[in-house]
Amino acid sequence: MWTPESLVIIGLTFFIAGSVKGVIGLGLPTVALALLTATYGLKPAMALLLIPSLVTNVWQGVVGGAFIALMRRLWSMLLLICVATWFGVHVLAMADTALLSALLGGLLCVYAGLSLARVTVPGPGRSESWISPVIGAVNGVLTGMTGSFVVPSVIYLQALGLPRDAFVQAMGIVFSVSTLALAVSLGGQRFLSMELGTVSALAIVPAIIGMAFGQKIRRRLSEAVFRRVFFYAVLILGLYIMGRSLFMPV
């Protein structure tokens, strides 16, 4: 059973994650997954993430005016994400959770490091038709194994050179499909429970309050400064999760 202290920690986690998303437009799944994994372990963190992530990302995915065009362009990537996530969760069921937690920490470090270094990946050009499903397959396997949606999907979407609003909408679409695929796959492996689902549903409230709060402080804070602080925090948290998983496994 979840104690009142645990519920407070989870509520604060999603408030913080929602605030980050409100300021810079992304980061809720990354922040929530990293903090919850460091506190409760990988599998419960993945389950708790599902409903708040889905609600916020569906909203992001349908707003922007480019939904049909993006679906036509990204359909093969989205299809492979769904298929590969199922296989990734099968690995999760059999593998050492400490090693997968360390992998999550590594992915967070890669994501933060590339963002801080402002690495520019060349666009796929004429190879997009076969690169997109490959990216979807890799992203899906990593999603199923670690619960992280960002590597390599966000890097690939940046390489496509989409306009800013279309890029934000594309992330919402990819994250929504990834969340649904992860929910179905976790349910198939019986990693979900009514208790976890209830707590995940309740976490929608602090996540939305956090988003509203973040949108307010966005007007007063330099987005560039905040993004830099955010990615340094993700880098440190990724290193902590790796170290804790490899040298202090539960």
Image: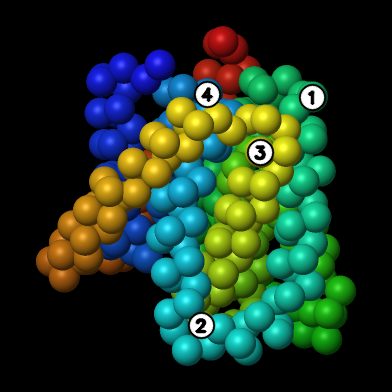
- Precedes in sequence: disc 1 or disc 2: 1
Q: CA distance from mark 2 to mark 3?
A: 31 Å
- Precedes in sequence: disc 1 or disc 3: 1
In front of the other: 141 or 238: 141
Q: Are marks 1 and 2 in contact (CB under 8 Å)?
A: no
Q: Is residue 229 visible?
A: no
- Mark identifier at residue 187: 3
Residue 190 occupies quadrant: top right
Q: Are marks 2 and 3 in contact (CB under 8 Å)?
A: no
- Mark identifier at residue 41: 4
Three-letter code, disc 1 = Met
Q: Residue 184: percent from the left, percent from the top?
A: 67, 47
Q: CA distance from mark 1 to mark 4?
A: 16 Å
Give above or below for 192 relative to 110: above
Give above or below for 106 relative to 228: above
In front of the other: 167 or 62: 62
Q: CA distance from mark 3 to mark 4?
A: 18 Å
Q: Which residue is mark 1?
A: 94
Q: Residue at point 16% right, 61% down?
A: 217
Q: Is residue 100 visible?
A: yes
SS at circle 2: helix
Q: Residue 242: percent from the left, percent from the top?
A: 57, 27
Q: Which residue is mark 2?
A: 166
Q: CA distance from mark 1 to mark 3?
A: 15 Å
Question: For mark 2, does the 10 Å Cα neighbourhood hold few (<14), some (14 to 19), or many (20 or more) residues?
Answer: many
SS at circle 4: loop
